[in-house]
Image (tube, rainbow, N blue to C red):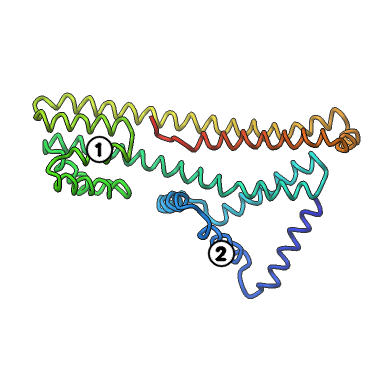
């Protein structure tokens, strides 16, 4: 581990001497940003930009801290497993390479939460506006004019209004919105408005009130699920990290010298690699579960 620390210090010194007139930290972050802009998939860029707009994107300093934490943890754990510097470097590189994927999952979660909140605002305010105007298109125009919607929902609602005027009916508009945002509250609300529009607005107040109650119950359920997910996530990560450190217990029971002798056996090494990789795989699956399908019914 001392060699790893010396290697990091040496790299920093070389960069500092080569770019003495510049900010080395800024140089590194600029290089990383350039690689991201070149190779990041379009979906990653979209959700990351929205995460930035919401003020929830990590800063360069936070990403740097994450890289350091991952590198140190991977280096320490792999060295305790194998007492081999080359293997430790391999796992450090592997751990750092996972960070962009974790960033994508996090941005996707933030984006999904934002979309769900916007869908809730869209449905709630459309029902309120319809109760006054008794017209679905006029209700949409009222929601747009109120300024409560943001992109991309705002653009989609404007497109719905345009389609309704062009076609002379709301069928294509609601079909477009229901397919793009397949939440059951959206589909049910659109179905209700189609029924009211085609059959007349007689006695629609009770149906709209019931729909509003349904939306409120769903929102409460989603936010409760979000808190439960966060609690489970913390416990899951603690458990996963403890599994990595079980090797310390094994070394304590066997003795460090005996453990190092066992490392000469290729099958022991394969088993140890398997433990690290399988545990890492389940941690990634857990992260994927925590960050995906937020707000879905």
Q: Nearer the viewer, residue 223 or 44?
A: 44
In this picture, is 23 found above or below 270?
below
Q: Residue at image x 59%, y 30%? A: 235
Disc marking residue 49? none
Q: Identify residue for label 2.
A: 30
Q: Secondary structure at mark 2?
A: helix
Q: Secondary structure at mark 1?
A: helix
Q: Position of residue 47 (x, y in %)?
A: 43, 49
Nearest to the eye among marks 1 and 2: give it: 1
Q: Position of residue 88 (x, y in %)?
A: 76, 47
On-image quarter of the C terminus: top left
Q: Position of residue 203 (x, y in %)?
A: 10, 24
Please state if 46 lies on the left or on the right of 159 as rendered.
Answer: right
Q: Are marks 1 and 2 in contact (CB under 8 Å)?
A: no
Q: Residue at image x 67%, y 34%? A: 278
Q: Residue at image x 44%, y 43%? A: 110
Q: Identify residue for label 1.
A: 175
Q: Residue at image x 23%, y 38%? A: 174
Please state if 260 lies on the left or on the right of 244 as rendered.
Answer: right
Residue 60 falls in image quadrant: bottom right
In this picture, is 282 found above or below 13?
above
Please state if 118 lies on the left or on the right of 63 as rendered.
Answer: left
Give the class, few, some or many, for how many residues have Cα within 10 Å of label 2's Cα (few <14, many ≥20).
few
Residue 262 falls in image quadrant: top right
Residue 221 falls in image quadrant: top left
Q: Nearer the viewer, residue 179 or 64?
A: 179
Q: Earlier in the sequence, mark 1 or mark 2?
A: 2
Q: Position of residue 259 (x, y in %)?
A: 87, 34
Distance from disc 1 to disc 2, alpha carbons, whole Å, reads 44 Å
Give the class, few, some or many, for how many residues have Cα within 10 Å of label 1's Cα (few <14, many ≥20).
some
């Amino acid at each position: 581990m001392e060699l790893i620390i010396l290697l990091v210090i040496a790299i920093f010194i070389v960069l500092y001497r080569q770019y003495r007139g510049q900010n080395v930290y800024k140089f590194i972050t600029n290089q990383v940003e350039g690689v991201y802009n070149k190779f990041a998939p379009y979906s990653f860029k979209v959700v990351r930009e929205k995460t930035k707009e919401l003020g929830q994107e990590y800063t360069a300093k936070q990403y740097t801290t994450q890289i350091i934490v991952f590198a140190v943890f991977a280096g320490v754990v792999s060295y305790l497993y194998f007492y081999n510097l080359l293997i430790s470097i391999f796992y450090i590189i592997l751990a750092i390479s996972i960070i962009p994927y974790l960033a994508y999952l996090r941005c996707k979660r933030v984006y999904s939460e934002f979309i769900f909140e916007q869908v809730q605002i869209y449905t709630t305010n459309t029902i309120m506006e319809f109760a006054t105007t008794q017209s679905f298109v006029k209700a949409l125009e009222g929601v747009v004019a109120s300024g409560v919607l943001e992109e991309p929902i705002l653009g989609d609602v404007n497109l719905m209004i345009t389609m309704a005027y062009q076609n002379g009916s709301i069928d294509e508009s609601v079909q477009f919105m229901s397919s793009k945002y397949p939440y059951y509250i959206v589909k049910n609300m659109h179905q209700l408005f189609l029924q009211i529009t085609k059959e007349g607005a007689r006695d629609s107040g009770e149906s709209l009130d019931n729909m509003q109650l349904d939306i409120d119950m769903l929102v409460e359920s989603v936010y409760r699920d979000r808190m439960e997910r966060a609690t489970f996530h913390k416990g899951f990560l603690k458990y996963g990290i403890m599994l990595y450190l079980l090797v310390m217990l094994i070394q304590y029971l066997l003795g460090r010298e005996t453990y190092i002798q066992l490392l000469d056996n290729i099958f022991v090494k394969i088993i140890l690699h398997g433990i690290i990789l399988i545990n890492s795989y389940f941690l990634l699956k857990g992260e994927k579960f925590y960050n995906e399908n937020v707000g879905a019914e």
